[in-house]
Image (cartoon, rainbow, N blue to C red):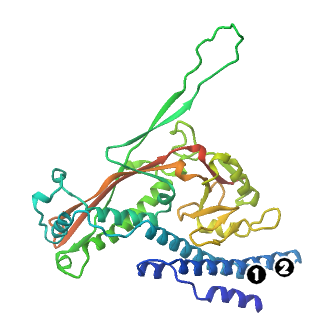
Amino acid sequence: MALQKVADLAAAQPVPRGILAVRADAGTSPGEIKALVEGMNKAFADFKAEHTRQLDEIKASRSGADQEAAIQKINAHLDRLQKETEDAHTKLASAQMGAGEKTVVDKEYSAAFRAHFARGEVQASLNKGVATEGGYLAPVEWDRSITDRLIEVSPIRSIASVQSISTAGYTKLFNNRGATSGWVGETAARPQTNTPTFSPLTFKPGELYANPAATQQLLDDSEINLESWLANEVETEFAYQEGIAFLSGTGANDRPNGLLTYVTGGTNAATHPWGDIKTVGSGAVGAITADSLIDLIYALPDEYTANARFVLNRTAQGVIRKLKDGQGNYLWQPSYVAGQPATIAGYPVTTVAGMPNIAANAIVALFGDFKRGYQIVDRTGVRVLRDPYTNKPFVQFYTTKRVGGGLLNPDVIKALKVNAA
């Protein structure tokens, strides 16, 4: 009974201010994040106590079913707290960087743009250079609104290298080295040695689009903030598509090439000049072990570990919470400082929902320096085409953004693959 009360308390205790409250307010204070951190540490302490009790029950040959049920309740509570803490950290970081500011660079042009949205009216003198393309370049505050929200909801974008471009593509040169040398005697000939070579790799942006619609009556309503409405509509579609593509996109229809496709045996494993992302075995059939996570860390060269992190989903984290090192310490640890994520073996964790669950042959985790490992290219500008004719009485806003992505350096990322046999 005491065990059940602990589990019920963990599941029912009030959750500190989280994502709903954060999004409703103008910002997130350090004090609110501190409360989230303290709540998660309390829940993790309960988790460790119940897990230790379960292990003692098993060793004594008694049923651990009650303990497992309690652990799962506390685990779910930890998941909620961790998600809310991560969201609060992101919100606070965005606020510190000026995210959400609505500074109007060109008030005259922006006012005309809003008039075009509501009534299809715009003065030719205010159309800044893109009329021949059939659309209107979005004002700066629009572009910032969409980009800032993508950082909040697309984890890969927030940890990768992002390059804005103004042309059709972005090419990176890779130094293959190849210079050779040799020992010679004092008077021996010095023949020419090999010269380093370079390999180019081009990142080409594809087109991402959303096409929300509203009635003209809705647009005429002076209470509606048209810019905020469109940003909210577009962020969901763009973030969802980007999140999938940066992780598992195969390049079809000019989509970005996702990280998982570069792992050994993946669709793009042979496309990078320096090879593929190498894997480390999980140490158990259909499961992962504490030793395999340590092996994954040590598979990465020392020079790349300073900014390394884990990428995996919440289900996998729930399993890893039960794993201990040789000294009996839990590998997973909650955030102890506001602004810092949870860690595994001391390295930060980024939760990516699209990562595979633990199963035979699954790439369950990635570990490395993603700033140096994955490149995102943004073709400058978000464009909006107002279409009041195609679907009357609705006015459609055909919104496009060109974005691409691909592996930057396979040496700085390693993958954990679950053993199949």
Query: Residue at 17% across / 65% down in the picture?
Result: 108
* Amino acid under disc 2: Glu
- Where 123 sits versus 131, above or below? below
For label 2, the SS is helix
Q: Is residue 185 left or right of residue 139?
A: right
CB atoms at circles 2 and 1 under 8 Å apart?
yes
Residue, far front: 186
Give coordinates of residue 213: x percent, y percent: 25, 70
- Where 187 sits versus 13, above or below? above
Q: Nearer the viewer, residue 392 or 50?
A: 50
Residue, far right: 60
Q: Nearer the viewer, residue 348 or 400?
A: 348
Marker disc for residue 67: 1
* Amino acid under disc 1: Gln
Query: Which is nearer the N-term, disc 2 or disc 1?
Result: 2
State the residue position of label 2: 57
Give coordinates of residue 271: x percent, y percent: 50, 39
